[in-house]
Each structure stands twice: as C-alpha cells, then as structure tokens.
Amino acid sequence: MKIKNCSRQKDGGQACKINHSLLNKIVVLGGRVICHAVMQLKKVIQMKTEIIFKIIVLTLLGTLGSILVGFLFVGNLIFVSSHSAFQFITMGFAGSLFFSLLEFTSKKEQLFGIAIIIILDITFILGKYISFSSIIRDLFYLLSLLLSIKLYQQFIRQNSKLTLYLRSFALAIFYAINNIIAAIIVYTINAKLEFPPIDFLIAMGKIGLLVGFGIGIGYDYFKQIINYLIKMLKLKTA
C-alpha cells in the first residue's frame, strides 16, 4: 500500500510538474500575443491619427481653395447664404470632404460620409426652408459634385501626364458639365417639364467650373505639403 501510495505521489508530482510547465508555456504565449496585439493596436492608432489628420487638412484646403476662387470672381456674395454664390462654401466643403473620404477611407465609411453630408445640408443649409423641391434640388447638385470628384479620382488623379494644378482644370470641367446636367434635371422636375433658360445653365456651369477648380487647387496643394506637415508634427506612419 505504501508503495502504491508512493507511486501515486510520484505520478502526482510529475503531473504537477507537467501542469506547471504547460502553464508557463501558456503564460509566455499569452504574453507574446498580448504584446503583439498592443503593438498592432498602437500601429492602428498611429495610422488612424494620420488618416484623420489628412482628412481634416484636405477638407480645409479644398474648402479654402473654393472660397478663394469664389471671392476672386464673385466677391463678398459668397458669404450671403441666400445667394447662389454661397455654393462656393457649401459645395466647396462637401466636395473636399468627399474627396478626402475617397482618398483615405473604405467604401462603407464613404457611404457614411455621404449620408452625413446630406444630413448637414438638410439641417443647416435648407433648415426651415426645407421642401420637396429644395430637397430634390440639393440632392441632384450634391450627386453631380460627388460624381465629378469620383470621375476625377478614378481617371485623372493618377495620370502622370498631367502635372499638379493642371489637373484642377479636369475637375473643373467635370463639375461644370455635371452641374449643368443636374440643373436641367432639377429644373425639369420642379418646373413641370419646362426646359431651363440658357442663362441659368450658363450660371450653373460657371459655378461648377470655379468650385471644381478651387477644390482641385486645394487638393494639389495638399499633395505638395502633407508629407512636410506630417514630419513637422511628428505623426508616425503605420
């Protein structure tokens, strides 16, 4: 009996040693996994910080570019919310924000951004003047802007044959054409199938041309200075 008891104690000791060894391995492996997770999280945070910074800078520069061009051609009217020239601010901001989302976010985040842009427009731009016709108008004009930026991002942005700032004219032309098309659709819907006056279409084309050019200038300037800003602010890349 004593031998058997001794045998059990010996086996138990070996089992205990095995358990301790296994536990140590688990602890070490768990520590490595945690360290790896922390390092990856740190990289994600650093990456997100840089992306958010780029989105903010590109949005600001594109908006400022649109405002500057509008001020040069129209003057103080761009600050009158009831005037069509106010689009240099509203469309400049919306277009620049969408541009930055296309550059640095996923499709899901881009769709979320579009929803936010539409909500902001309905809430702060239309406000108490909201109506079916105004919603139709703003939706088509926003879609024409977003489509123009998408076309630019898809076909022009990576074109090595076009130099910086020259590419701004491409975005200007895209938006001018799409804004005229949107104006025809909106006018036809809201005015019950009447074709809009030529003067009205020319005015919408000019706004699209200048806003698109301003956003394009802001984007090209962003491409020139962003790496310098990141180094200056010591934002680490992932």
Image (tube, rainbow, N blue to C red):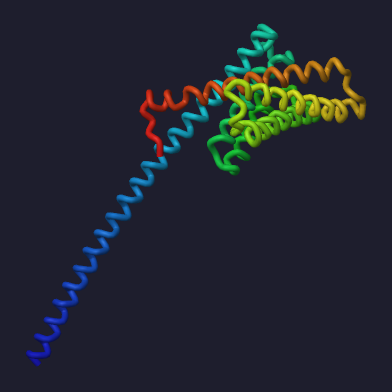
Q: Which residue is at the far front?
A: 161
- Residue drawn at x 20%, y 68% is 21
Q: Is residue 115 visible?
A: no
- Percent position of residue 230, x then y: 41, 27
104 vs 27, left or right, is: right
- Residue drawn at x 67%, y 23% is 91
Q: Nearer the viewer, residue 140 or 153?
A: 153
Residue 147, quarter of picture:
top right
Q: Nearer the viewer, residue 224 or 104?
A: 224
- Percent position of residue 211, x then y: 67, 20
- Percent position of residue 134, x then y: 77, 26
Q: Is residue 42 visible?
A: yes
Residue 17, quarter of picture:
bottom left
- Residue drawn at x 70%, y 28% is 145
Q: Which residue is at the far bottom?
A: 1
123 vs 58, left or right, is: right
Location of residue 32 with respect to 170 vertically, above or below: below
- Residue drawn at x 37%, y 34% is 236
Q: How many marks are shown on the rendered structure? A: 0
119 vs 178, left or right, is: left
